[in-house]
Amino acid sequence: MGKSYFLHCPKTGGRYVTENVVNVFRTDLASRNIMPSQHLAFGHNAWKPVVDNPDMFIFSLFREPIKRIVSHYVYFYTDHRAELCTKEKMFAALETDVLDSKRIVNYQSQFILDDSGEFYGTPSTPIALDKDLLFQRLSRIDMPIRTENLSKEVCNNILLKIYDVAGVTPVDTSLLPHIQKPEYTSELSKNLYESLTAKEKERLLELNYMDAEVYESIK
C-alpha cells in the first residue's frame, strides 16, 4: 500500500480536481470502510507532506502565471470588491516593494519551496527563490499538469493511479459523473484579465519570471 499527495497550489484549478478526483476517491473508500487519509493527502500544505513522506506519488497543477496572479489578486486582496478589481490597483500593489507584493509574485515557485506546512494565501514572509532546489523538487512531482490541459480523461488517469498506489480495486471511471471545468470561477477575474494589454501581460511575466520558467518546463 502506498500514499498519494495532491500538491494543491491555490488558484490553479484545484477545485476541479478536488471534485473529480479527491472527493470521488475519498467517498468510495469510505463506503468500503477504508480510511481515505491513509492513502491520499491533499490541501494547501506546500512541500511539508513530502518531507514527512518522501515516497508518495505526487500530482500537482500549474496554471499560466498571468491568469493565476490575476485570480490570486482578486481572491486574496480585494474581497471581490469591484472597485478594487482594476489593473491600475493591481499593478500598484504588485510594483511596490512592500512585503505583500513580494509574497504574491512567483507564488507557485514559493509554494513548492516552502516546507513549513503553514503556507496558505500568502506566506508570512517571502520564500527565497532557490532555483536549483525548486527544479529538483519539480523533478520529484510524478504527474505535473498544466491547468489548461485538465479534462475528464486526465482526472480519470490520476484517479486510477491513486487506486493503483493504494493497492485498492478502482471504481469504474466510465460510470462517474463529471463536473465541468470553468475557465474562471470569478467574473471579476475574467474581466480583469481581459482588460490587460500585451505590454501589461509582458510586465506580469517579468514580475513572475520564476513562475513563468516553471510553467514553460511543464509540457
Image: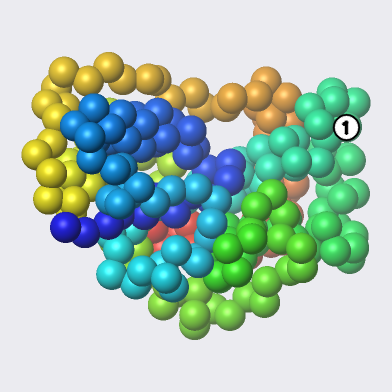
Q: Amino acid at mark 1?
A: Leu
Residue 12 lies left or right of residue 187; in this view the side is: left
Identify the image quadrant of residue 141.
Answer: bottom left
Identify the image quadrant of residue 54.
Answer: bottom left
Identify the image quadrant of residue 53.
Answer: bottom left
Question: Horizontal and vertical percent for residue 210?
Answer: 59, 67
Query: Residue shown at 18%/44% (left/top)?
Result: 163
Q: Does residue 169 appear anywhere in the picture?
A: yes
Q: Residues within 10 Å of mark 1 (few under 14, many from 20)?
A: some
Q: Does residue 21 appear anywhere in the picture?
A: no
Q: Nearer the viewer, residue 43 or 143?
A: 43
Question: Horizontal and vertical percent for residue 22?
Answer: 35, 37
Question: Horizontal and vertical percent for residue 96?
Answer: 90, 60
Query: Residue shown at 79%/27% (left/top)?
Result: 80
Q: Up-down: is 41 above or below 35? A: below
- The number of discs equals 1
The residue wearing badge 1 is 84
Residue 63 lies left or right of residue 190; in this view the side is: left
